[in-house]
Amino acid sequence: MNTVNRVAVNTTVNYVQLILNVLIGLLTVRFVLQSLGEIDYGLYNLIAGVITLITFISESLSQTSIRFISISLGQGDSKNLKHVFSSCFSLHLYMAVILAIILEIVGLFLFNGFLNIPSDRLSAAQIVYHCMVVTLCLNIVSTPFRAIIIAHEALVFISIIGIIESICKLIVAIVILHTILDRLIVYGILMMVVGLVPFAGLYLFSSIKYRDSLSLKLVGYSSISQIVNFAGWTLMDVFGVIANRQGYALMYNKFLGPSANAVFALAGHVEGPMFSVSASVINSIRPQILLSYGKGDKDRTLRLAMTAGKLGFSMMSMIAIPVLVMLPDVLKIWLGDYPDQTVFYARMMIVACMANQITLGLSTANQAFGRIKTYSIVVSLVRMSALPISIILLLIGCPGTVAMVVYAICESLASASRVIVMNRITGLSIKRFIFDVVLDLIVPVIAAAVVCTVLYSVWSGVLGLLISTFCSAIAYASTIYLIGLTKEEKSSINALISTLLGKIIVRR
């Protein structure tokens, strides 16, 4: 399968997965919120936030594994690929054990007065915490298997696993609606069981499909030192992302209580599908970015990184812009009654996410080049500055909404800093990025926002949502294609469309 066909197939299955996961996720969140109630729902997300604060280590290792395995695959050295996989597997297994011990020790302090948890829900919260630790370890150990599947661009299987996992989560949400036991405890245990699905699927598929590339032999530090060194700096970049999000969850819990956690969590669920839209594009192109560098084509690596950011932002905006305009009605239809200030929190998160997507492709390019020290320090410090600033503002009496504005501003500045740092370490032209990416996106965004606002002022309700969203997406897509894409990007898009239509016609 050639590159265009592979990207076409991967993009298609990613969006099929995305659509199904969003639809299933909307139902799941509604059922879970209805079952647990505002307080338990906030507690669950608070505990998840504590675990996620630690998973920045896991995520940095994941990105590192994908980078080393993909570049090794691009170099065509099968022996080295097997050695790299063995090193990655050993590192992840060691880290899973270490993190499990650390989290269990930390848990003794968290539930001894540090977290703001009602006394009658303390035991349930502790059980959920232990379940999440197990799920985290399963996820860490499965990462090398996921990485080798992604490196081979077998994203169809990754999508299938994602859909199955989402369906399992929906089943769990339905089960807790009807259980007579403590619903928070039942939910935590069943979510741990669901965590076994991707672990088993990824292990079995990679063991069968890529048997010659796998080695489960454990190795010592000397064999994994290069990967550890790279992961160390990647860790800072990932920590900036996770610390900001989950640090905010802890901050709101300490200053405003569990109800504020529920608002923040719901805002995250609104923003989550928007990010997934962009992530689907990035994930489809990421293997090509890394493989291009592995083959020595650095110029193509940067071009693909810029294109990934532009297309990811565009696909996200076609959904995000209508949601920003019509969010109160979207929440009413989705949740019925929802906590106060959810609209403002969600809008700030979506704006922050949109700003981040414009330059997100550069993150993969930076990993390919391997010069991540300066990049990680600069981008992470800019992003993480939001948390101390927000804590100071809350201490002097500012409302929680002000902290969300700070969050959006710092995310935007962190996104801009990627371009500056990549200019210094790879020679990426800032002028080229502005003209070929940023300026090309302004007119489509304005066109989509105007169309959506005008149409929604005429038609309201569900019909208005559908008409406004559809027409807004058409306005954005038409504008970005006509004036926002370079000739090379148009050629690639045309080839993708032709390939997809060809496959549909052949199947018929």
Image (cartoon, grey):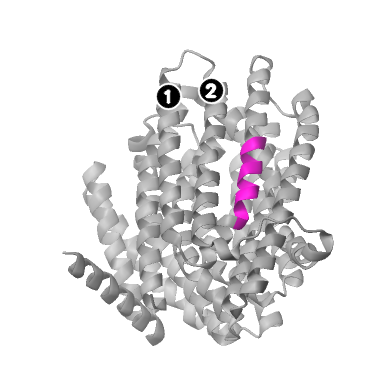
Q: Is-magenta flag for residue 138? A: yes
Q: Which residue is mark 2?
A: 186
Instruction: Name above or below for residue 28 compared with residue 139.
Output: above
Upstream in sequence: badge 2 or badge 1: 1
Numbered disc 2: secondary structure: helix
Left or right of 225, for residue 38: left
The type of residue carrying mark 1 is Val
Q: Residue 473: image x %, image y %?
A: 31, 62
Residue 35 in the magenta stretch? The answer is: no
- In this rendered view, identify the residue nearer to me: 98 or 179: 98
Q: For residue 445, which quarter of the picture?
A: bottom left
State whether the magenta stretch is mostly helix, strand or loop. Answer: helix
Quadrant of image for the N terminus = bottom left
Residue 178 in which image quadrant: top left
**Residue at (62% x, 57% y) in the render:** 144
Q: Which mark is residue 437?
A: none
Circles 2, 1 touching at the beta carbon (< 8 Å): yes
Say what secondary structure mark 1 lies in: helix
| Residue, far left | 508
Callout 2: few (<14), some (14-19), or many (20+) C-alpha neighbours within 10 Å?
some
Q: Which residues are magenta?
A: 133-144
- Residue 48, position as x, y percentages in the image: 62, 37
Q: Which residue is mark 1?
A: 175
Residue 170 picture location, percent across and down: 41, 34
